[in-house]
Image (spheres, grey):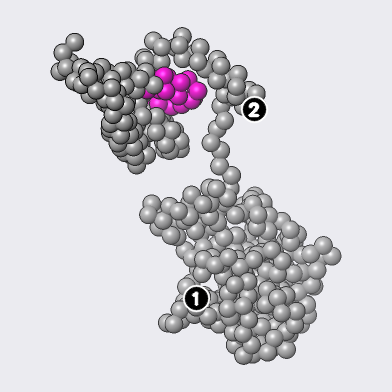
Amino acid sequence: MPLSVLFGMLALMLILSAFFAGSETSLMSLNRYRLRHLVKLKHPGAIKTHKLLQRPDRLLGLILLCNNFVNNFAASIATIIAIKLYANDESIIAIATGILTIVMLICSDVTPKTLAAIKPELLAFPASWIYTPLLKILYPVVGFVNLFVNLLLRLVGVDVKKNYPDALNKEELKSIITEAESLMPIRYQKMLLGILDLESITVEDIMTPRNEIVGIDLESPIEDIVERIKTSPHTQLAVYKKSIDRIIGFLHLRKALIEVNNEAFDKPAIINLLTKPVFIPESTPVHTQMLKFKSEKIRVGLVVDEYGDVQGLVTLDDLLQEIVGELITDEDSSAAREQSDGSYLVDANITARELNRITQWSLPTEGPKTLNGLIIEFMETIPEPGISINLHGYPLEIIKCDKNTVKLVRFLPRK
């Protein structure tokens, strides 16, 4: 056989070896979720590739069978060429083997596999058109090889016939969303992360604390009540007698403002306008309460503990804010304001969840719900203004306190 033909055959074997090595890497490196998306879009190459990957044992058996045959055939041709060129040199076979190894490593292994790892779809989809008929032709040989492979895998408890789906748990899905910064605006990222957290959040985590509930005390003079109705920024006010534990109902300001200027407007008139209060256990998941608000067509409820004492108030807007976040939040009135030096001036009544959402920090959300609660639990005492602490890795300075709570803190820039 002429040397020109032998060199041509050797070049062909190197190309085929590069194809098999690159296609193996590309098929195994494909993003399975993008592949399923392309299958739904009826992409022909994706459909064939998806069918091949249903049985990776058969696919890998086919690729490695072909690749080993091509590599061994290339080594044989290289040996023949070396003998033809240098028949009298006994060391030429070893030299030819060394040269062929380096050439195949560079041209037929590392280069195509690197390209396939970077751009897997570039080679995977065209390769699927070749492997589909090739698998049918060589199926007896591939099946014989896989018979022993499957027996060995069963010895270690692996059944290749079972299709193990690439299922993601919630934390893995959150990681994917977090890393998709270049694909979506940050506000949409926060919305998706908020939806994933709904199952683990209870109304206790997002409620307005008892001491911050704005309402109407029917024991107050009617003039003060009218003034509260006219100036309230809220659409619904809790109406009670002396204490929020003795709540009577909720007053919708839209109804009240129609009647408030009438001379007959008095406390009994207010009571006639009230809606029945709804009580929510503090352990109720947010997504469950959202469905209840929708089905019962209400927008506000009181959160109670196991003893029936009122702990706070939650509204439909509070629940929606867990999903849409800053889209319905007035950033100018945020309880955490970033300063020019990189520090944060924070109202200590803010919840740890809200602070984490604003700053992208990771303060613990199990246990105390507010920043004030975290600080007091950490220090085991009520601190004095001017004290600095390192709260779970976040340095802060106490700016303002009263007798039993922390009011204002400054988080220092982290080094």
First in sequence: mark 1 or mark 2?
Answer: 2
Whether residue 134 is visible to the viewer of this picture, yes or no, is yes
Residue 102, disc = none
* Mark 1 to mark 2 CA distance (whole Å): 49 Å
**Residue appearing at x 45%, y 60% in the figure:** 187
**Residue appearing at x 55%, y 56% in the figure:** 194
Give how far across and how far down residue 136 sits, in percent: 41, 12
Q: SS for tag 2?
A: loop
Q: Hey, which residue is sitting farthest right in the picture?
A: 307
Q: Nearer the viewer, residue 205 or 258?
A: 205
Mark 1: amino acid = Lys
Give how far across and how far down residue 141 sits, in percent: 45, 11
Q: Nearer the viewer, residue 337 or 109?
A: 109
Q: Is residue 86 toward the left or the right of residue 237 in the image?
A: left
Rendered view: 239 above or below 120 = below
User: Does residue 203 show up magenta in the picture?
Assistant: no
The quarter of the picture where the N terminus appears is top left
The image quadrant that residue 114 belongs to is top left
Read off the residue under disc 2: 156
Read off the residue under disc 1: 415
Q: Nearer the viewer, residue 338 or 391?
A: 391
Mark 2: amino acid = Val
Give how far across and how far down residue 182 sits, in percent: 37, 54
How many numbered marks have been drawn onto this rendered protein structure? Answer: 2
Q: Is residue 49 toward the left or the right of residue 337 in the image?
A: left
